[in-house]
Structures are given as C-alpha cells and as structure tokens.
Amino acid sequence: MYKRTVLIVDDKEINRKILARMLQDKYGLLFAENGKVALECMHEHADVIAAVLLDVMMPVMNGYEVLEEMRQDEVLSKIPVIATSQRDCDEDELKILEMGAQDFIAKPYKAELIIRRLNNIIKLREKAAMVNKAQKDELTGLYNKQFFLHKVQELLEENSHQKYDLLCVGIERFKLVNDTFGVYYGDKVLKYMAAMMKDIAREVGICGRFGADNFYAVLPYKEYTNESFEPWIRRVENFPIEMDIKIHCGIYAIEDASIPVEAMCDRAQLAADKNRGKYDEYFCVYDDSLRKKLLHEQFIIGNMKPALEEHQFQVYYQPKYDLNTGRVAGAEALVRWIHPEMGMISPGDFIPLFETNGFISQLDEYVWECACRDIRSWRDKGYPPIAISVNVSRADIYNPKLIDNLLALIEKYDIPMKYLHLEITESAYTENPQQIIRVVGRLRELGFLIEMDDFGSGYSSLNMLAEMPVDVLKLDMGFIQTETRKASGKGILSFVISLAKWLNLAVVAEGVEQKEQIDVLRSMDCNYAQGYYYSKPLEKSAFEELIRVSEVAEMICTSRTTLDYTINEKNNEALQDGRVMMIVDDIEVNRAALAATFEKEYVIKEFENGKDAWLYLQENASKVDIILLDLLMPVMDGFQLLEKIRTNHQTRQTPVIVMSQMDETMEQRALKMGADDFVSKPYNALVIKKRVSNVVASYELRKIKHGLVSIHLGKSRREEK
Ligand code: C2E
Ligand code: CA
Ligand code: CA
C-alpha cells in the first residue's frame, strides 16, 4: 500500500517517539527537532510530504515562525499543517489557525484522534488538488479549454487598457506522429510542446491546450516577424525523433475585447490553419481575408439545403481517354454549383466544407442519381455504353445504408453495374483500412468497379495497393505533374505503373495537360488519361454530343478475370513456403526488434557476424528473400559480406538492405556496392517495413521480367499463369 509521508516537528525526542509509534503503520515519517530543520526538510521533500505535525513551542525557530515562512512560499503554503501544543486554550488555537494551520491538537496525544485529523486534512488537500486538476489538462498541465477561456476573459476585464495577442499553435500532421511512432511518442511531443508554450507565454502566464495538438497562449501585443518565431521553430525541430516536427502558428490581435474569447480562439486557429504547410512563413495573422473566407463559408452552409432542393447542383462529365487508341473510354461525374447570383461555385470551395459538416452524403447521393439517370437515358437513345465514375466520400463509407442505396439506384435505372465506377480517395484507405476493405470489398463483390482516386497524393504505400479491393488506380494530378517533370521521378512513376499492372489494375492518369506527359505515360504503358489535354469537364449536353459522335471504347479491367491477391496472403505464403529474412547485426537488441517486426511475414534467421551469415547463405540462397545487413560488425563486416553476395552468381540478385548510423559516405559506398536500399539507425519500424516491401516487390518484378515467375506466389496464381 502506498504510504503518505508526514513530517513530525517537535523539539522533544520523547514526543517524536510517541508520535512515531502511533503513526508508523499508516504513514511514512520524517522528523525535525526545530523549525529551521523542519523548513529545510520541507524544501527538500515538498513533493512527498502530505502533512506536517508542528509543535508550536520550540527553541531556535518556533511554530509560528515556521507557519509564517511557509505562508510566503508558493509550494510550502500548500502543505497542510496540524499544530500541536502543550496547552489547550482557545486563544492559541485561534491564532495558529489564522496563521494558516489547518487544525490543532493538544497534548497528550490520542492516537485515534491524530490519525483521523491527519486523514481528514490530507484528503481535503488532495481533493483541492483534484479540483485544480480539472482546470488543467492532464497530460501537459496546461489549462484546459474551459479554464483557459475563463482566464483570458478575466485578464481582459482586469486589464482593459492593455492590448494582447492570442496565439494558436498546431503540430503539422500530428496524427501521423502518433500513427508512426505510437501514442507514447505522441504524448512526449505534446509535453515538449507544452513546455515550450509555457515559455512562449511566460510574460502573461496564460496558456492552454484544447485537446489533440491545439495549443493557445496569450502574448503581449506587438508586431511579430519571422525572427520572433525563429527560436520556437528551431526548438520544435530539435525534438529528438526521426521525423521533422513542424508547427503552424496563427495570431489574432485582440482588438475588440467584447467578442467571446472562444470566437477569438477560432480566429487564431483559422490563421494557424492558413499557415499549415508554409514552412518559410512561420506564422499567419488573422485578417479580413480570413474573415471573408469565414463569411463565404457561412454563406455556403446557409445556402446548401435550398440549393439542393432547387437543383442548383449540376453534374458535369470529364471524359477519360484510352492512351493507345485515343478513344473515349469513360468519364468522371463532377459536381458544379450554379448559383443564381454568384454563378458557378467550384467544388473546391464547398466539398471540403460538406465533408466536415456531413452534407456531402446527401450531395453525393444526388450526384449518383443524376449519373444513373443519365446513363439510362443515353442507353435509351442508343449511344454506345460508357462507364461513368462517381466520387464516393469517406463519410459515405461509414453510412450503413451505402450498399442498399447504390443497389436501389442500379435497380431503379436498370443499368449494368460495371458501368458505374466508384472513385474512393486514397486517403480514405489509409484512415481505417479494415472498415474500407470490408465495405468496398463487398461493393466490389457485388459487381461495382472500384477506382482508387488520388493515388500518390498522400502517404501512399505500395503494400496498401495490394491489400485493397480495387480495379483501377487513378494517379493523382500532382503526382503526375511533378513526376513527369523531373527525370528521376520517372523511375517512380514507371515503377508504380508496372506494379499496378502486376496487380492487374488498370491505370488512369489524372490532370494530364501536355502532350509530353501523354508521351511519357504511354511509354510507361499507362492505359488511360483524364485531363485538360483531352477535355475539361463538360456540361451534360456537351458530353452527350461527344459520345454521340465518338467511337467509345470499353474500359478494360483485367482485375476481374484473375484471382484477388493480397499482401497478407502473400506473407502467409512466404511464411508457409519457408521464405527467409536474414538479419545480420552484432547487437542482439537490434536483431530482436527487427525479428519482432517481421516474424509474421518471414522465417527469421539471425546472425551476429558476416561470416556466419555467409555460411548460411551459401547453403540456402534460393530460400532467402531479403537480407537486412548491419555495416559495422566484428569478424566480417557488412561491406565484406555485401561484396561476397554481389559477386556470387547464386546471390547476386538477392535483395539487401544495409543498416547503419546516419552516415552519407557509408550509405553511398554500400549503394555503389549493390545494396538495394539503406536505413539509418535508430530505425523506425514503419520506415523499414516500407523499405523491405518496396525492395522485395521490385525484386519480384525483376524476376517476372526475366521470366522467373517466383515460386512463392501461391498455387492458384501460378496455375493461372
Ligand atoms: P477529383 O476527384 O480528384 O477530380 C479531379 C479534379 O481535377 C476535378 O476538379 C477536375 O476538374 C480537375 N481536373 C481534371 N483535369 C485537370 C487538368 O488537366 N488540370 C487541372 N488543373 N485540373 C484538372 P473539380 O471538378 O474542381 O473537383 C475537385 C474535387 O472535388 C474532386 O477532385 C473531388 O474530390 C471533389 N468532387 C467533385 N465532384 C464531387 C462529387 O460529386 N462528390 C464528391 N464527394 N466529391 C466531388
Ligand atoms: Ca475523383
Ligand atoms: Ca482525383
């Protein structure tokens, strides 16, 4: 049981002994024989002392003087004191209570009474601390939202002549920090930030956290520049983690103290949001343009419902073209808001808002219905059948009626399912993969074609691609535009395209604007393209005219004729087939961590030096899928082993990832010697997982290219080849 600590202050040893005997079972005890020693002891143990039993009459420094000193001290004043005295007289009692003692006990001591009193005051104080805690954010000790708002209100009322700034700070992609490094690290980052916020706010002393990574502070009013923020930005960057932590900052200058503090915080936050992703501007100040944006948003939200009822939303169609034949092979339905006074409002202005307020689901259903109705009418008019893809938002996925609603549309308009493609954005896939796999997998089984939208725009992972139920990969416009521009990027682009093909996905490139991009994409064997080069999104009548006069090609999705294949299956197969990962590192904990990371996917073989690893590899070369190799080891180091691996004809192709402390020259040397990739220590599990799967995937692609279809792709798959 946890024992609270009580300090016994009495000049007579006998009294101390009596008290000790009474209390030692219930409390941990400290002793002092006079006031001076008592104060020293309190300073030293302030954090553990739960209460003090203080004799009033003592030499050197008496109880009154001790109480007086305690009262002056911020920390000691919070420790409860029970005074003890020879006399039992009202006057003394009153005086001692006035001076700050919580209670009073007369000698001779009665054990029960002392224990009860001690217990009471300790409980009381702990409860007070609890109340205090409710004002503070548990994790960081900063004020919570309610208390922060209250404190700012108080400050503004009491200092109406003073001017202040309200600062809002957020951590860039904080969710990613949590996902990548775990909640423990996430919390560490938050605490680190909180300590910094306290320093930033030290002049006024008011700072708070409103959940997650939302920090606020009150600063004295002044003109801020990038230099004012420089030290804080640097301090954040110095957080010891293998990821650049960035923050975004917003300032609202409190000019009108009459608006609610919460609205002030919203404004500071709005400014902070605007500062997101702008790494050379360290902060953003709330101003009128942001106010206008807010008003515009209010306008949109206020008008969305009538707009839907009055059919102000219209569906445009942007054709997709077959890159080889130049024929139209499909189209994407894109919504437009044609407002009677404002004219056309672009989806960029309202979709994100509707995604946050939930209205997107209604709008999406409206768009789907328009698309289905149009597909029906084109069929009735005898136009060649064409697949139309509609956007499905993340919110739709969580709608339990999604499947029924879509099926009802298919039935109502009597259209074959394969002509309705569903575009689901990549970011939805990363968010809750299990849910997505379930819902989208079901839709796909039912016969809808699934397109993964915006691939390459976020944290795309190639493993994810293999795991997800999709038929078509839509490469994001930004990805296409940056990767086709740079010479080195083309490697990535062509790799992604070949991997997609390996997984039997059709590939659509989005946002293609130039002839050169078309040529590059065609040379990489990309199938389809959508973009201004071919056509902008067209009004329904214009699109109808296009398909009326064009030769329309069907979009071919080979995914439907081959068996589905997921990384998990592959992993299990790898494990079943006894595929081996070799971990070569002289430090045991490193090996253990790596083994734990990969044990579900590979048979793990650990080696503490290059020599043992080489002996094993010579015997088992055909079983080994991947080698993780530490560069610095005794007996035979990583470089020596790598050289052997790359010069032996049996192991020449075996993927090797080298690991070492951050060191560019070593990295370069190893890559030159034929290592497939490099991870620096201390490594991060996610990074190394990605590297391994990328390296292994590209190895498998190489094998396929060379006609060496790997023997562990699984039986069903093999038989199909
Ligand atoms: P998205 O699904 O990635 O759609 C592609 C966007 O790129 C469209 O913008 C399209 O007009 C634009 N675009 C196409 N080719 C080019 C090009 O060559 N160059 C450039 N610069 N842009 C090109 P739009 O129509 O403004 O739509 C923006 C986003 O709004 C869409 O991105 C989609 O996420 C969302 N959206 C549009 N309609 C709907 C809808 O009905 N439902 C849902 N949930 N979202 C929609
Ligand atoms: Ca789309
Ligand atoms: Ca897209």
Image (cartoon, rainbow, N blue to C red):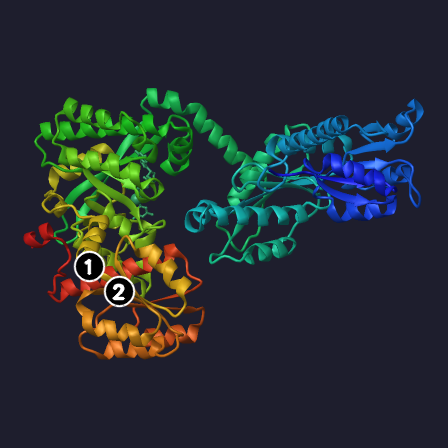
Q: How many labels, in total?
A: 2
Between 348 and 498, the one lying in front of the other is 498
- In which quarter of the view is residue 11 placed? top right
Kindly tell me whether residue 516 is visible in this rendering.
Answer: no
Q: Distance between the Cα atoms at labels 2 and 1?
A: 13 Å
Q: Secondary structure at mark 2?
A: strand
Apparent side of residue 314 relative to residue 706 in the rendered image (left or right): right
Task: Look at the picture and state if 182 lies above or below 242.
Answer: above
Task: Look at the picture and state if 387 lies above or below 579.
Answer: above
Residue neighbourhood size for the residue with mark 1, other residues' Cα within 10 Å, grouped as few (<14), some (14–19), many (≥20) = some
Q: Which residue is mark 2?
A: 626
Q: Which residue is mark 1?
A: 578
Camera-near label (2 vs 1) is: 1
Q: Residue at x 23, y 59 (%)?
A: 697
Q: Quadrant of the C terminus?
A: bottom left
Residue 467 place in picture, x, y as percent: 24, 47
The disc labelled 1 sits on which kind of residue? Gly
Apparent side of residue 1 relative to residue 675 in the rendered image (left or right): right
- In which quarter of the view is residue 85 placed? top right
Apparent side of residue 635 relative to residue 92 in the rendered image (left or right): left
Which image quadrant shows ligand 3? top left
The disc labelled 2 sits on which kind of residue? Ile
Between 415 and 69, the one lying in front of the other is 69
Q: Residue at x 23, y 28 (%)?
A: 403
Residue 691 place in picture, x, y as percent: 32, 60
Residue 600 place in picture, x, y as percent: 28, 52
Looking at the image, is mark 2 or mark 1 earlier in the sequence? 1
